Amino acid sequence: MDLERVDRITAGAVGEPGERTFFLQARENDRTVTILVEKEQVELLGTSILEILATVGRETGEGPPSDDLGLEPPLEPLWRAGRLSIGYAEERDLMLLEIEELVEQDESDDEPEDEAEGEGSSEDEGPEPGRVRIWATREQMLALARHGAAVAERGRPKCRYCGNPIDPQGHMCPAMNGHRESAGR
């Protein structure tokens, strides 16, 4: 599925910190696409967007304000994202976000097959993952990066020693040899 030039693109989360579900959402005209993602994917996508924009060599405007980037109902994701790829098409002056569906591999697919018996590898079998290609302006992607970072930051605080999230009751920090890091620090 291709969204040739989206009207809006955003990331958001629903739920309480530690129990949140993250989404990427894009709209082109009256078609809205929602994809289930991991918090880390939102964070890495934002970092990648900023890295690409730093190399483009063009001034990028602010884009839409964060207040305009909330998720739109209904939140009915097509599927869970596996691989995300981001790039910049200079000839179009647009950024491309490609999202590929996470497809669970069958346990039997991991076993090597005798290729002398078969005509191909097991990679040709199984369901084809869904794909969405989203074209957006540099300004829209910059706003997505900023907003995605803000959404991810609203979660549980991270431990200053190990980087793991700290629950309200604290956590057993492996970097502190099992001593507790409290949530108030």
Image (cartoon, rainbow, N blue to C red):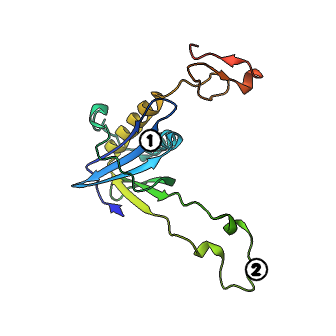
**Which label's residue is closer to the chain start, 1 or 2?**
1
Which residue ends up furthest to the top in the rendered image? 184
Name the spot of residue 172 as percent of width and height, x first: 69, 23
Q: Secondary structure at mark 1?
A: strand
Q: Amino acid at mark 1?
A: Phe
Looking at the rendering, which quadrant does residue 123 occupy? bottom right
- Residue at the spot 58% in from the left edge and 25% down from the top edge: 158
Looking at the rendering, which quadrant does residue 116 occupy? bottom right
Name the spot of residue 7 as percent of width and height, x first: 25, 49
Q: Label 2 crowding class (10 Å Cα cut-off): few <14, some 14-19, many 20+? A: few
Query: How many numbered discs?
Result: 2
- Alpha carbon distance from label 1 to label 2: 41 Å
- Residue at the spot 48% in from the left edge and 58% down from the top edge: 100
Is 125 placed left or right of 62 in the picture? right
**Residue 36 in the image: above or below residue 162:** below
- In the foreground, 45 or 162: 162
Q: Quadrant of the C terminus?
A: top right
Q: Amino acid at mark 2?
A: Asp
- In the foreground, 105 or 51: 105
Name the spot of residue 119 as percent of width and height, x first: 66, 85
Is 13 placed left or right of 38 in the picture? left
**Residue 159 in the image: above or below residue 11:** above
**Residue 68 in the image: above or below residue 38:** above
- In the foreground, 21 or 50: 21
Residue under pointer 2: 114
Q: Which mark is residue 98?
A: none
Q: Quadrant of the N terminus?
A: bottom left
Is 102 placed left or right of 74 in the picture? right
- In the foreground, 17 or 81: 17
Residue under pointer 1: 22
